[in-house]
Amino acid sequence: MKTLLLGLLLLLGAPALAQTLVEVTAVAAITSSLDASVRFPSGSFKAGRGSEAIVARIPDASRFNLEVYAARGVAARLQPGFVQQILTGFAAAGYFVENQQETQVAGEVRTRYNLRDETGRAALLFVVRKGDELVFAFGVAR
């Protein structure tokens, strides 16, 4: 009877233990891969052609070394969660949001996140959303 009860308790506690183990493993993997760069969620890819048009929307773009990325598929449709994943990745890399500004221009929503690390180095996340499309630019101050 004791064996059955112990087995039942282990089975009931196993999902919580497994979830905790997965979370610890994921955090360790993310932290170890984030030295000077930020790891983006799956579903994002580096944008090549057309990235100049996104950079042109940023008034002080010349202050930053910018790279442009785009989300595709399900990731683009889950825009708020996707952006939250990106900000979490930045936080894990040591960049925290100082302020946020959102504007709407020509049917697209542009959100600018000004970030800073503990040494005071500035960074920028600029997100452009229109319909199911999501494009973002990230850069560290030159």
Image: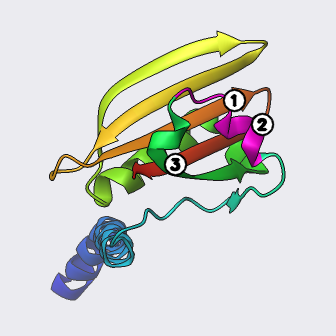
Residue 3: horizontal and vertical position, in percent?
21, 87
Vertical placement of residue 64 versus 98, above or below: below
Range covered by the magenta-colored residues: 51-59
Q: Residue at x 25, y 56 (%)?
A: 94
Position of residue 8 in the picture relative to residue 65 (left or right): left
Answer whether residue 88 is magenta in the image: no
Position of residue 23 in the picture relative to residue 78 (left or right): left
Q: Earlier in the sequence, mark 3 or mark 1?
A: 1
Q: Residue at x 35, y 73 (%)?
A: 18
Position of residue 121 in the picture relative to residue 110 (left or right): left
Quarter residue 25 falls in: bottom left
Residue 133 is labelled as 2
Residue 126: horizontal and vertical position, in percent?
54, 36
Residue 129 is labelled as 1
Determine the secondary structure under disc 2. strand
Contact check, label 3 and label 2, Cβ < 8 Å: no
Crowd class of label 3 (few under 14; some 14 to 19; many from 20; radius 10 Å): some
Determine the secondary structure under disc 1. strand
Q: Which residue is mark 3?
A: 138
Q: Is residue 61 visible?
A: yes
